[in-house]
Image (spheres, rainbow, N blue to C red):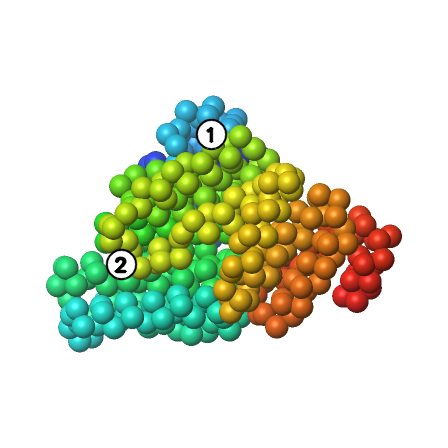
Amino acid sequence: MTSVIGANIRRLRKARGWSQARLAREVCRLAGISGEPIGRQEISRYETGKRTPREWLPLIAVALGVSVDGLRAPQQALQLPPPSLSDFLPDGDPLAPLEGRTGRRIGMAEVNDLRQRVHGLRLADDVLAGGDLIRPALRELRNAVRLFQRSSHTEPVGREFLVQIGELAQIAGWVASDAGQHAEAERIYRLGLSAAHQAGDSTLAGNLLGSLAYQTTNTGDVREGLIMAKAALDAAREAPPRARALYLDRVAWAHAKRDEAQSAIRALGEAGEALSQHGEEEDPGYLYWVDAGELQVMEARVYTELRRPLRAVPILRDVLARYDATHTREVALYSSWLAVALADANEPEEAAATAERVVTLSAGITSERTADRVRVVLDRLAEYGDVPEVRALLDHVA
C-alpha cells in the first residue's frame, strides 16, 4: 500500500509542477502551521515508501486535490496519464550555474576531452567491477558538474557538455549500483536524466531512466521498475534500433520479475525485431555493447526467471562458450543464471559444478551484483543438499 501511495503522491505532485518542498509548504499552510514541521525530505520519504504519511495523509490529499482513498487507489483508478520521463526528473536543477561563477570559458575542446574520459570509463567497466571504479567514477562526475556550473559557454557547447554529463552519469550510476550503493546510484541517474532532458537528448534520457528502472526492478520495487522501463521506452520513440532493443529488454526483464510470462516474451520478440533494423546508422557510443549476443543473454535470463530451463540452458551455454573471458564479472553473472536453470532442470550435479565456477570467479570481484547472485545460486541449490556434489560445495562456502 505504501508504494502505491508514494507513487500517487509523486505523480500528482509532478502533474501540478510542484517540487517536494512546494508540496511540504502547501501541507503546512493547510495545517495553519508556520515553520516546516514537514519538509522536502519527509515528502521524499513518503514518495519512496520509506515512511507512511499517516498523520499528514489527509492534508496531502487536500493539497493534491484528491481524496485519501484516491491516494490509496491504483494508478488506473486515479485516471492519471501514464508516467512520463518528466515524472522521474529530480526536484530543482542540480546543474544550475553557481551564483557569482567566475570560471573560465569552455569550448568543444573540453567537451571532446570529457567524451574521451567517459568512454574510457565505459571500457574500464568491461573488465573492472564497481568497487574498483566507484572512486574515479564519482570524481569524474563531480569534476564535470563543477566545471559546467562554474564556467561560461555558448549554447551549443553547453548542450554538448550536458550530453557528456548525462553519459558520465549513466556509467557512474551503473558503477555505483554494481558497488551496492543503490541510493547514490539513483541520485546519479536522476542527475544524468536532468542533463539529458535539458540537452534535448531523448535517447540518452531513455538510457538513464532505463538504467534506473533496471536497478529498481532488481532491488525490490518491481512494479515501479516496470513503470520506469515503460516510460523510458516511450520517451525514446525516435531512438535508433539498438537503443530501442535495449529499452525493450529492460521492459522484458521487469515483466519476468513480475512473473508476467507472455508480456516478457512479447517484449523480447520486439527487442529482437528492433535490433534487426540496425544498419549503418551512427549510434551513440554507449550502445557499442548492444548486439545479438547480449539480447540472447537477456532472453536466457528471462526464461530462467520464468522457470523455463529447457529454453534457458542451451542459450546460456552457447553464449558462455564464446564470451570474452576477460569480462570476469559478466561471465560470473551469466554462469549464475546457468546454475539456477540447471537446478530448475533437475540437474543438481551439473548445477553444482557451474555454481563452483561462479563462486570462484566472484571471489576476486568487488561487485555487489555477483555477490548477490552467489547467494541466489546457493539458496537455490540448498534444495539438493543431499546430492554429494552440492553438499561439498555448500560445505566449502559455509
- For marks 1 and 2, give the CA distance: 33 Å
Q: In which quarter of the image is residue 166?
A: bottom left
Pick the residue in front: 235 or 354.
354
Left or right, residue 361 beside residue 380: left
Q: Residue at x 35, y 42 (%)?
A: 276
The picture places residue 270, in percent across and down from the top left corner, at 41, 36
Question: Which residue in the structure is indicated by mark 2?
Answer: 163
Give the residue type that dot 2 points to: Val
The picture places residue 94, in percent across and down from the top left corner, at 33, 59
Pick the residue in front: 245 or 28.
245
The picture places residue 273, in percent across and down from the top left corner, at 38, 38
Looking at the rendered image, the quarter that the N terminus falls into is top right
Q: Is residue 37 visible?
A: no
Relative to 90, is 58 above or below?
above
Q: Which residue is drawn at 26% across and 58% down?
A: 163
Q: Residues within 10 Å of mark 2 (few under 14, many from 20)?
A: many
Q: Which residue is drawn at 22% across and 69% down?
A: 112
The picture places residue 147, in percent across and down from the top left corner, at 26, 71
Q: Can residue 170 be seen in this view?
A: yes
Question: Which residue in the structure is indicated by mark 1?
Answer: 75
Q: Which residue is drawn at 47% across and 23% down?
A: 77
* For the residues bearing labels 1 and 2, Cβ distance under 8 angstroms: no
Pick the residue in front: 121 or 62.
121
Circle 2 — which element? Answer: helix
Q: Residues within 10 Å of mark 1 (few under 14, many from 20)?
A: some
| Marks 1 and 2, the one that precedes in the sequence | 1
Farthest-out residue, left = 154
Circle 1 — which element? Answer: helix
Relative to 43, is 188 above or below?
below
